[in-house]
Image (tube, helix red, strand yellow):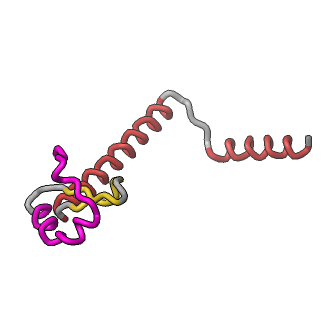
């Protein structure tokens, strides 16, 4: 969605016209409220906000699946070590540094 100049509203004007801005947002507009000339908050329809949250959850799930696939590829390529051996080597390195 494209934001036009009429969708950018100073906070002082937003206070005076909140009901109208809310009605416009409910109709599908997205309003950017500015404070001291800078972006501050947005007014959007709650269904659109839910949709944005759903998209973010799906993005996170895709990232997790990608990480899982990379991990499985590492296992298949033999690029893994068991946790116990990794922890042991970390402890040995720390002990060696502490004794220096």
Q: Main secondary structure of the magenta part?
A: helix
- In this rendering, the answer to whether 61 lies above or below 81 is below
Please state the horizontal and vertical placement of residue 33, each as a whole percent of the image: 27, 59
Q: In terms of depth relative to the viewer, which is nearer, 30 or 58? A: 30
Image: 49 above or below 69: below
The residue segment tinted magenta is 1-26
The answer to which quarter of the image holds residue 20 is bottom left
- Is residue 50 shown to the viewer in this render? no
In the image, what residue occupies the spot 27% across and 67% down?
12
| Screen quadrant of the N terminus | top left
Residue at image point 27% right, 60% down = 10
Q: Is 91 located above or below residue 29 in the figure?
A: above
Q: Is residue 63 left or right of residue 14?
A: right
Which quadrant would the C terminus be assigned to in this image? top right
Q: Is residue 24 magenta?
A: yes
Q: Position of residue 62 (x, y in %)?
A: 33, 44
| Furthest residue in direction top, as rendered | 77
Residue that sits furthest to the left in the current view: 27
- Residue 8 appears at what percent x and percent y? 22, 53
């Amino acid at each position: 969605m494209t934001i036009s100049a009429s969708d950018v509203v100073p906070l002082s004007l937003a206070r005076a016209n909140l009901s109208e801005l809310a009605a416009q947002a409910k109709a599908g507009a997205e309003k950017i409220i500015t404070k001291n000339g800078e972006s501050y908050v947005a007014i959007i329809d709650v269904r659109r906000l839910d949709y944005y949250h759903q998209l973010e959850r799906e993005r996170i799930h895709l990232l997790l699946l990608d990480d899982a696939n990379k991990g499985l590829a590492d296992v298949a390529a033999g690029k893994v070590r068991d946790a116990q051996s990794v922890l042991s080597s970390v402890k040995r390195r720390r002990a060696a540094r502490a004794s220096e």
